[in-house]
Image: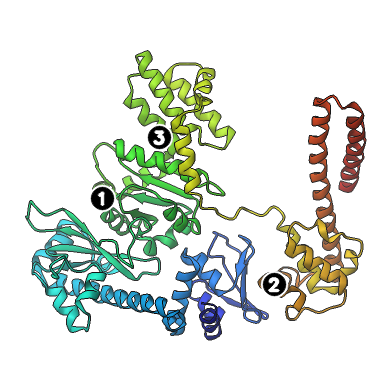
Amino acid sequence: MQDAKEEVRARLVIEDVIGEYVNLKRAGRNFKGLSPFSGEKTPSFYVSPDKNIWHDFSSNKGGDVFSFVMEVEGVGFREALEILARKAGIDLSVYESKGNQAVAKLRKRLLEAHRLAAQYYQQSLVKNQHAVEYVFKQRGLSKDIVTEFQIGYAPDTGNALTQFLVKKGFSANELAEAGLTNRFGGDLFRSRMMVPLMDTSGQVIGFTARIIGDDPNAPKYLNTPQTLLYDKSRHVFGLSQAKDAIRTNNYAVLVEGNLDVVSSHQAGIKQVVATAGTALTEYHLKAFSRLTSSIRLSFDGDKAGVAATERAIPIAQIQEPPVELSVISMPENAKDPDELIKQDPSLWQHAIDNSVPAVEWVIDQYARRYNLNTEQGKSDFVATATDIVRNIESAVLRGRYIEKIAIVAGTREHYVNEVLNTTSATRERLKKVADSARVGKKPIDPTEYQDSLIALTVAYPETRNLLEDFPSELMATTERQEFVQYLKDHPTASLETTPKELQEYDTYVKIVLLKADARYGDWSENDRSIETARLIRQVITENKKKQKDMLTRKLREAEENGHSDKAAEIRGTLNGLIKEISDGKK
């Protein structure tokens, strides 16, 4: 796909693509605007047409046009490539191997079949008075929301859609592969309100269908089966419509029903999505990870809802940084968000705003399940509650919940701790769940300031004399070490293009140059030198602090093992280092 990637890159203008998401204004050779990833009021988002890259100073994110689409759309590279290929008018299938070409061609055909099916169902809706009555009056949906979600109606006939798509050139095999026909070759969906399932870019990949007839033997809901396009364990309903609101509000609401999502969006609460069933998987978390690390679950308080929440906790805990899970409790007079919204949309927002941490909610559910007036009930409650608490890595949070369990059970904390520290089959099971579900998220880089040092010295050669005695190995990463060493070896070199010695880090070089231009372009030569010297001192001091921590550990080990001579030697070195750090701060 490398050839396809470069062809797409060559055909697109980066500022035009990003300009579809961000209001950009010219700033010298670059463009700048408000970050789409934070709620900033002062523009710190830059695009460099010369270098074909972008950088967001508010979140320290940056890269090429592909990384931007991945971030803003919340998708992986392949999906970003497909989105940009459509913008560039490029058929990716020609870049595939023969086997992959066949799959890509079929996928393209299935997407087209679904696009046409959605249009057909929309046209069928306006032609059927019974469906109109159900959608607009009984369900209370507006024309705008029906249009936004492309809601339609499947006629109560045997093969109306099939005949329509066959006339459009689709074969019976293609329609079966799309999941649009039943085992007899007729329409799978009949006499149902049709709600399209879309991928993150808004392409229809399947349907969820709600019956509107009176057939008591038919299931209320019927969904597209597993296909090349649709995988229910990965799909998040409404994400293409909700992603902007999720990013703006910095949290996502996960509900059980697709129509709860539709109703919520109609009420103006658009950070709401749903999954197929209540299971929150690592794939769902991956879909959310680029948009938010806070998820509020609106699950039932029954055993299935508690079990789903409990399963989600270890998966969320092992994210880096961890995903904050909380649970929304519905008032007793409403069984689901749709019903609550019909009473008053503000009640739904109030419930969202008053969500409680997932672990706390699960503990409360367990407290209702057991008879805490008996010793056996208390014992069972503590044993069950500690199984969920033991997965919490934060000692502070773990301590808080241990205290809560003790208070609810009317027992002492040391007893809860004893139970907590007891190895159990449940503990091993949850550990395996967490290990198998590990989906990492890049942590915040505490050494990001080192990029500023490189930015100054690469863009303004007059500051490089300050690097003369600076050890490049003090930098935190290989790319930074090699960059600093290159600058020391080439004190007067101008980096208009990436030199061959740094080609491996081409994107990083371009981002650093953009940072230098955007952040330090208006500074005086004297101010740049002062800032360079300060950043060098910071690197040196941070490294000395690391050495101090290491020596402190070694001193403790020597003292515990009775090695007094070695302890005295380490103590002398440590005291000298502490004095150096203290003098460096003056």
Q: Is residue 168 above or below residue 537?
A: below
Mark 3 element type? helix
Q: Is residue 514 visible?
A: no
In the picture of the structure, the residue carrying the numbered disc 1 is: 338
C-alpha separation, residue under disc 2 versus residue under disc 1: 53 Å
Mark 1 element type? helix
Mark 2 element type? helix
Query: In the rendered view, does 32 fall on the left or right side of 271?
Result: right
C-alpha separation, residue under disc 3 versus residue under disc 2: 49 Å
Q: Residue at x 48, y 45 (%)?
A: 316
Marks 3/2 in contact by CB < 8 Å: the verdict is no
User: Callout 3, which amino acid?
Assistant: Trp
Query: In the rendered view, does 300 fall on the left or right side of 390?
Result: left
In the picture of the structure, the residue carrying the numbered disc 3 is: 361
* Quarter residue 178 falls in: bottom left
N-term-proximal mark, 3 vs 2 = 3
Query: In the rendered view, does 405 fall on the left or right side of 160?
Result: right
Q: Position of residue 413 (x, y in %)?
A: 52, 20
N-term-proximal mark, 1 vs 3 = 1
Q: Is label 3 or label 2 in front? A: 2
C-alpha separation, residue under disc 1 versus residue under disc 3: 22 Å
User: Callout 2, which amino acid?
Assistant: Glu
User: Callout 1, which amino acid?
Assistant: Asp
In the picture of the structure, the residue carrying the numbered disc 2 is: 504
Q: Is residue 156 visible?
A: yes
Q: Is residue 19 above or below residue 577?
A: below
Q: Residues within 10 Å of mark 3 (few under 14, many from 20)?
A: many
Q: Position of residue 149 (x, y in %)?
A: 29, 66
Q: Is residue 540 above or below residue 37?
A: above
Q: Position of residue 372 (x, y in %)?
A: 36, 18
Marks 1/3 in contact by CB < 8 Å: the verdict is no
Q: Residue at x 85, y 54 (%)?
A: 537
